[in-house]
Amino acid sequence: MGKCTYCGRAVETPFAAKAEGDSDILSCCSSECLEKAQRFYRFTKKGMAGFIVGMLLSIILIMAGALNEAYTGSLRLLEILMPAGFMLLGATILFFPFATPQTFELMGIKKTVLVTRGIG
């Protein structure tokens, strides 16, 4: 007996299918959960570029603020760049709630997205 890929409930007779273009097997408790899991996998593939760009830009902003303060001693730019970097980081996580595969296995897609967005 396994767990539903989407909602995390126990599954006795799973609706199994492959994720589009992926080797992952989706084992879901219903056809509705299977459709939602496939939709999330499609969203993950489309949104990965935006996620990476958002993460990189937020890291660049945070590091630029820290380096500027270290070299100039001025807090003025630090007070702008670091909060902007953290706000971009939170927005990126909010719009692209991607987590590790282990987290998705542990809690299911639905709960993982809620937790990730809450952290964002």
Image (tube, helix red, strand yellow):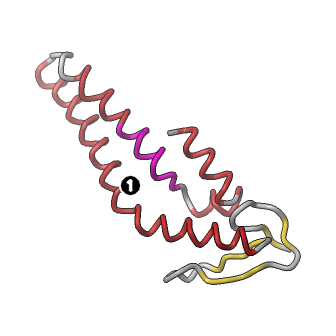
User: Which image quarter is the N terminus in?
Assistant: bottom right
Task: Residue type at mark 1: give it.
Answer: Phe
Residue in the picture at 63% in, 57% down? 103
**Number of marks:** 1
Q: In the picture shown, does residue 42 fall above or below 78?
A: below
Left/right placement of residue 56 relative to residue 36 reads left
Left/right placement of residue 111 relative to residue 60 reads right
Residue in the picture at 72% in, 70% down? 32
Residue under pointer 1: 51
* Residue 7, position as x, y percentages in the image: 73, 60
* Residue 70, position as x, y percentages in the image: 18, 24
Residue 22 is a magenta residue: no
Residue in the picture at 21% in, 16% down? 75
Q: In the picture shown, does residue 31 fall above or below 68?
A: below
Q: In the picture shown, does residue 61 fall above or below 75?
A: below
State the predominant SS element of the stretch in magenta: helix
Left/right placement of residue 90 relative to residue 110 reads left
Query: Which image quadrant for residue 9?
Result: bottom right
Residue in the picture at 62% in, 44% down? 115
* Residue 93, position as x, y percentages in the image: 46, 46
- Magenta-highlighted residues: 88-98
